[in-house]
């Protein structure tokens, strides 16, 4: 990973810090401190997290911690007075406040490892102050992909599940995507989980990216959020692609889904989250993608664990179950493509048909699959991606 901030470059592969193009020698503990801050740019890093990462949880003196922080500041050209790069929040922790870009390379669809596509990661601030991480990759006309449950900008980029799809879009467009609040590289503190909070996050990202009008792609829980956004800001969305979405959250559409059942699911999340081999994590992932290969299944678990905590996962699931965007469907006036898997166990295909019947002129495509997450190993994957690209390309003039 390569982090660029202020006039510095922090390269974790070469284990090197450069400033103004010149290598800056730093001791290992200082380098680890800078890596931790860069990985959590825009977020507050507690002293406990600092000790766990840099000193492996060993007891160290305040003087030792202060010495390493001062050395880190000196290395990046900062000081305790200006704190233009590293900010100290008394009795709480540290924060890397300088804007950070992250470059990562992955193979192209052709498998040519010498041809690299890059992504850069930035941060936007939502209306309630929540820090939202967003990534940009590729070049050409802008396409925005709404956040959903669960993502991690860095891990998705190299994921065998999401990487090939992101490559396909980045090969044709300037792709902008983000981690929802409480997940991935975005602020882990959930200040609000109402649908208007998530809509505000999407608006903050596209504003920060300088986008006026753009096609919007959404999957799963990103679908109702994108519907509200398109209805509220019709002048900003040129096309809408919705996959595996829903109009009504489970507690709104399923009268058999009693509060006791919902509470039981939340208890399972809290007890099984963070344990890759637990029966819960295996079952939870199997519902989302029962046709996954072992590599894909393992990667899904890895992303889930990296994306958020058990408490956040439970809170986010509870919030999504309450969404109902029925009243917004007639207000969506943009060309819309709705894709849904025939045997989706997370959001039934009936919800996809409800979306299509409620949005005037919407196109509906049902694909034969039992996966909620569209997997590269699934025969339907190519059909799903090609349908999205074809729909986006309709905006281009013919020659």
Image (tube, helix red, strand yellow):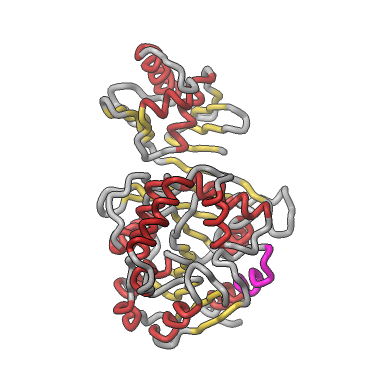
**Highlighted magenta segment, given as a residue range:** 377-385
- Horizontally, is 379 left or right of 336 in the view? right
Residue 21, located in which quarter of the rendered image? top right
Question: Please, is residue 282 above or below residue 391 in the view?
Answer: above
- Horizontally, is 77 left or right of 190 in the view? right
Quarter of the image for the C terminus: give it: bottom right
In-front residue for pair 398/358: 358
Question: Please, is residue 332 above or below residue 194 in the view?
Answer: below
- Horizontally, is 215 left or right of 199 in the view? right
- 384 magenta-colored: yes
Q: Main secondary structure of the magenta part?
A: helix
- 2 magenta-colored: no
Q: Can I make out residue 235 in this image? A: no
Question: Please, is residue 58 above or below residue 125 in the view?
Answer: above
In-front residue for pair 99/367: 367
* Residue 133 place in picture, x, y as percent: 42, 49
Residue 163, located in which quarter of the rendered image? bottom right
* Residue 264 place in picture, x, y as percent: 40, 56
Q: Residue at x 51, y 50 (%)?
A: 304
Question: Please, is residue 221 above or below residue 94 in the view?
Answer: below
* Residue 29 place in picture, x, y as percent: 50, 20
Q: Can I make out residue 93 in this image? A: yes
Q: Residue at x 64, y 59 (%)?
A: 164
* Residue 143 place in picture, x, y as percent: 49, 65
In-front residue for pair 70/353: 353
- Horizontally, is 229 left or right of 68 in the view? left
Residue 1, located in which quarter of the rendered image? top right
Q: Residue at x 36, y 65 (%)?
A: 321
């Amino acid at each position: 990973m390569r982090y660029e901030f202020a006039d510095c470059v922090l390269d974790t592969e070469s284990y090197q810090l450069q400033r103004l193009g010149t290598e800056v020698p730093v001791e290992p503990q200082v380098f680890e401190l800078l890596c931790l801050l860069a990985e959590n740019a825009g977020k507050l890093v507690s002293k406990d997290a600092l000790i766990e990462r840099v000193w492996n949880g060993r007891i160290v003196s305040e003087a030792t911690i202060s010495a390493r922080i001062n050395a880190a500041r000196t290395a990046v050209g900062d000081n305790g007075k200006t704190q233009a790069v590293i900010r100290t929040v008394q009795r709480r922790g540290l924060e890397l406040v300088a804007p950070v870009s992250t470059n990562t390379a992955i193979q192209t669809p052709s498998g040519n490892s010498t041809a690299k596509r890059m992504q850069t990661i930035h941060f936007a601030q939502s209306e309630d102050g929540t820090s939202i991480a967003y990534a940009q990759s590729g070049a050409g006309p802008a396409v925005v992909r709404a956040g959903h449950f669960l993502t991690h900008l860095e891990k998705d980029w190299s994921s065998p599940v999401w990487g090939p799809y992101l490559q396909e879009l980045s090969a044709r467009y300037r792709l902008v995507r983000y981690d929802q609040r409480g997940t991935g590289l975005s602020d882990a503190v959930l200040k609000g989980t109402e649908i208007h909070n998530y809509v505000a996050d999407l608006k903050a990202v596209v504003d920060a990216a300088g986008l006026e009008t753009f096609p919007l792609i959404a999957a799963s829980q990103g679908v109702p959020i994108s519907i509200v956004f398109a209805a509220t800001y019709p002048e900003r969305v040129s096309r809408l692609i919705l996959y595996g979405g829903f109009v009504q959250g489970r507690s709104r559409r399923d009268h058999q889904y009693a509060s006791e059942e919902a509470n039981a699911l939340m208890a399972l999340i809290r007890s099984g989250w963070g344990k890759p081999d637990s029966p819960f994590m295996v079952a939870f992932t199997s519902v989302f993608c029962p046709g996954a290969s072992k590599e894909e299944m393992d990667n899904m678990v890895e992303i889930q664990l990296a994306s958020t905590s058990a408490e956040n996962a439970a809170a986010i699931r509870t919030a999504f179950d309450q969404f109902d965007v029925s009243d917004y469907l007639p207000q969506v006036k943009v060309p819309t493509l709705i894709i849904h898997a025939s045997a989706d166990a997370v959001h039934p295909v009936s919800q996809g048909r409800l979306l299509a019947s409620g949005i005037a002129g919407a196109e509906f495509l049902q694909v034969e699959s039992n996966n909620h997450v569209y997997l590269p190993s699934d025969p339907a994957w190519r059909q799903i991606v090609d349908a999205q690209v074809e729909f986006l390309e309709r905006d281009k003039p013919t020659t």
